[in-house]
Amino acid sequence: MSRATTTTEDVPAHARRLRPRFPVVALVALTLVLVGYVAIQVIDARVDRSPEAFCRQLPVVANLDRSLGNLDPVGVRQDLPQLERLRDSSPGEIEPSVAVLVQTTSDLLEPLDRAADDGGAALEEAWRARSADAAAIAQAGKAVQDYAKATCGIDLTAPGG
């Protein structure tokens, strides 16, 4: 005949010792998650997302255009973090456009790496694959150019940016 209930005598001693630890481990894990969330919020609140911060960061990304134009994957890889910082300092009204440019640049890194070996065919293929996004990419670039000129007095279309 089987028993329907389990008594503490039926549970091995090592299992009885583990039970009280689970709530403690769960509490510690929850505390770590909450501390991490608060830390992220504090760090995010410290990021300056102002037109002034955007304008300060904008000249730093000037080399990216040259690196892309020269099909220089090393230069693009070095300049991409600057573009990401520009996105992070962008005010809300321009951040989505900068984010499109960051994603596009990031997506082109692998084809750029192969471009020197295949005469640029990988890069052409990458652009063809993004053809559906071409209008949005162009619009994002134009928005950043217009914002830079109106807000920072920087003409990104002029030689030397």
Image (tube, grey):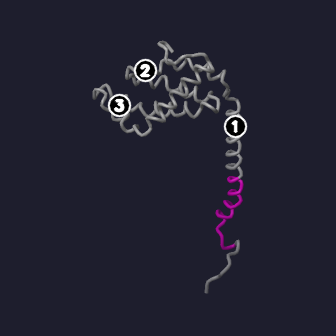
Mark with earlier residue (1, 2): 1
The one nearer the camera, 19 or 129, is: 129
| Image position of 127 (left or right of 16) | left
Which residue lies at the image location 59% right of the left edge and 32% below the top edge? 95
Closer to us: 76 or 135? 135
**Amino acid at the residue labelled 2:** Ser
Residue situated in front as seen by the camera: 4 or 33: 33
Q: Residue furthest top?
A: 160
The answer to whether the residues at label 3 and label 1 have Cβ atoms under 8 Å apart is: no
* Residue that mark 1 sits on: 39
**Residue 58, which numbered label?**
none
Secondary element at tag 3: helix
**Does the magenta stretch mainly form a helix, a strand or a loop?**
helix
Against 98, residue 161 (above or below) is: above
Number of residues whose C-alpha sits closer than 10 Å to that of mark 1, classed few (under 14), some (14–19) or many (20 or more): few
State the residue lying farthest toward the left: 118
Q: Secondary structure at mark 2?
A: helix
Q: Is residue 74 left or right of residue 139?
A: left
Front label number (1 vs 2): 2
Q: Nearer the viewer, residue 115 or 74?
A: 115
Point 59% across, 20% down: residue:
57
Mark 3 to mark 1: distance in Å?
Answer: 40 Å
Question: Which portion, as a residue range, is magenta?
Answer: 9-26
The quadrant holding residue 144 is top right
Contact (Cβ within 8 Å) of mark 2 with mark 3: no
Tag 3: amino acid: Leu
Q: Position of residue 120 (x, y in %)?
A: 31, 27
Read off the residue under disc 2.
Answer: 67
Task: Quadrant for residue 148, please give it.
Answer: top right
How far apart marks 1 and 2 lie (CA) works out to 35 Å
Badge 3, how many Cα within 10 Å: few under 14, some, many 20+? many
Local secondary structure at mark 1? helix
